[in-house]
Image (cartoon, rainbow, N blue to C red):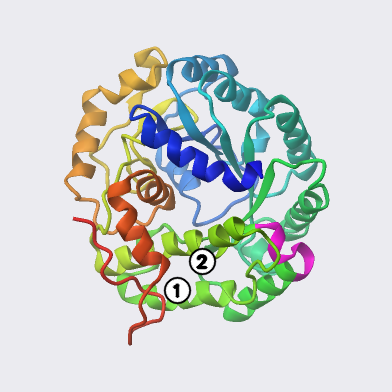
């Protein structure tokens, strides 16, 4: 019950508290034991000649004490389970910022470590819902090739199965499978779909399907073909025994967000009011603050500098007032981002801003067209 209605409770909290951050994305490390070509963190690390020291456990504690109320904390990397203090970081935000939903994205290579942290968080944060997001992009050796990590599919799959098997022991943990649509063959996606259905069961996980964030890899004229790949992967993996709210989230809400992103990329124009920078912020492992991830990780925004949070005494709210942050925020509000397809900004804007709800509702019931059967029409929020 707690997991099912956590989303509705979070929406209500944000509607009644204008200063509350809906989502804070914290990249706690830029180190990773995989080598994914499409990983934006890896590309950003290679592009930077100098890097400051990673934020320490105590620095994260100071940030959590000063940030105010936060609904959802997204912990990423790199590979976040490479940090020994990941549980301590999460506890600080739970204790001081009132975080009630935490998402941890992992490549699944450190299964034993991940399960230890999950057990620790469930015990230490009893009022929190935890989303463990495991990346599976294809089946077998194809996944290992894409991630440049031999044997990764097997160990990541074992972790996913262990989470499913331990549902009674981990009642507040949601299993999320993250899949990035890139150059996989249709056959590889079919085999992944079969694996997920047979080994995990459609009722036991949420499927978050993303597209390669490298703009040059999926030109607007090709988005329909990649959308068809997504539909191929989704077919036959619908939940059939879950409660009605969980089914709506699996079958409606998640797909609607992706349809909006697809349409936005096809149009090369924003179709909703973006709240990145006001309801969403991003913090890098070395303490740089930005309104959203594209300003940090996409080369098309070289003129926007992130705010060094150490210079603002770890006060995120003070960082919001910095000139560099306000300049990026003005760019977003002027709707100059055009074909953004980063789902965190979309989720935050569409879910927590009532002005965007008509757009979301329209996407929940997409109209068919001659072009494809999963484009969104008439969803622009002016």
Q: Is residue 281 shown to the viewer in this render?
A: no
Classed neighbour count for the residue bearing mark 1: other residues with Cα under 10 Å, few (<14), some (14–19), many (≥20): some
On the image, the x and y values in percent for residue 21 come to 40, 31
Give the vertical position of 61 relative to 255 (above or below): above
Q: Nearer the viewer, residue 279 or 356?
A: 356
**First reached walking from the N terminus: tag 2 or tag 1:** 2
Answer left or right for 150 relative to 367. right
Location of the N terminus by quadrant is top right
Where residue 241 sits: x, y (%)?
71, 65
Where residue 209 sits: x, y (%)? 53, 62
Instruction: Report whether 51 appears left or right of 317.
Output: right
Question: In the rendered structure, are the residues bearing label 2 and label 1 in contact, judged by CB atoms less than 8 Å apart?
Answer: yes
Q: Nearer the viewer, residue 144 or 74?
A: 74
Q: Report the disc number at residue 181.
A: 2
Give the Cα separation between the discs numbered 2 and 1: 7 Å
Viewer-nearest residue: 87 or 237:
237
In this rendering, would 206 be left or right of 334? Answer: right
Label of residue 6 in the image: none
Is 314 one of the magenta-colored residues?
A: no
**Vertical side of 188 occupied by 150: above or below:** above
Which range of residues does the magenta coloring cover? 198-205
Q: Is residue 98 visible?
A: yes
Q: Secondary structure at mark 1?
A: helix
Q: What residue is disc 1 on? A: 226
Residue beneath the point at 55% across and 24% down: 93
Residue at (44% x, 16% y) in the render:
66
Rendered location of residue 187, percent (x, y): 63, 81
Q: Is residue 368 above or below residue 207?
A: below
> Mainly helix, strand or loop, the magenta region?
helix
């Amino acid at each position: 019950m707690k997991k099912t209605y956590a989303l509705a409770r979070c929406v209500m909290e944000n509607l009644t508290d204008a200063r509350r951050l809906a989502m804070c994305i914290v990249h706690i490390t830029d180190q990773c034991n995989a080598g994914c070509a499409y990983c934006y963190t890896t590309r950003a690390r290679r592009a930077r000649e100098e890097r400051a020291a990673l934020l320490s456990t105590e620095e994260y504690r100071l940030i959590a004490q000063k940030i105010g109320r936060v609904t959802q904390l997204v912990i990423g990397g790199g590979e976040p389970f490479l940090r020994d203090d990941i549980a301590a970081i999460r506890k600080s935000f739970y204790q001081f910022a009132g975080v009630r939903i935490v998402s941890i994205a992992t490549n699944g290579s450190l299964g034993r470590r991940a399960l230890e942290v999950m057990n620790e968080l469930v015990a230490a944060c009893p009022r929190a819902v935890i989303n463990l997001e495991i990346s599976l992009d294809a089946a077998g050796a194809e996944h290992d090739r894409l991630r440049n990590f031999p044997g990764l599919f097997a160990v990541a799959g074992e972790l996913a199965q262990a989470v499913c098997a331990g549902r009674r022991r981990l009642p507040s943990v949601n299993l999320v499978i993250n899949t990035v649509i890139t150059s996989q063959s249709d056959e590889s996606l079919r085999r992944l779909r079969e694996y997920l259905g047979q080994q995990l069961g459609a009722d036991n996980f949420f499927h978050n399907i993303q597209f390669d964030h490298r703009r040059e890899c999926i030109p607007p004229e090709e988005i329909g073909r990649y959308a068809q790949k997504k539909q191929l992967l989704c077919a036959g993996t619908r939940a059939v025994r879950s409660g009605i709210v969980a089914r709506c989230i699996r079958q409606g809400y998640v797909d609607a967000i992706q349809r909006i992103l697809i349409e936005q990329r096809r149009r090369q124009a924003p179709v909703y009011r973006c709240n990145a920078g006001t309801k969403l912020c991003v913090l890098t492992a070395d303490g740089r603050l930005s309104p959203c991830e594209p300003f940090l990780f996409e080369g098309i925004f070289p003129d926007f500098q992130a705010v060094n949070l150490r210079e603002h005494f770890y006060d995120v709210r003070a960082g919001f007032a910095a000139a560099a942050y306000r300049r990026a925020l003005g760019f977003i509000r002027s709707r100059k981002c055009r074909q953004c397809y980063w789902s965190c900004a979309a989720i935050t804007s569409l879910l927590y801003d009532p002005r965007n709800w008509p757009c979301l509702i329209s996407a929940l019931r997409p109209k068919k067209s001659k072009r494809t059967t999963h484009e969104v029409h008439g969803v622009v929020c002016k």
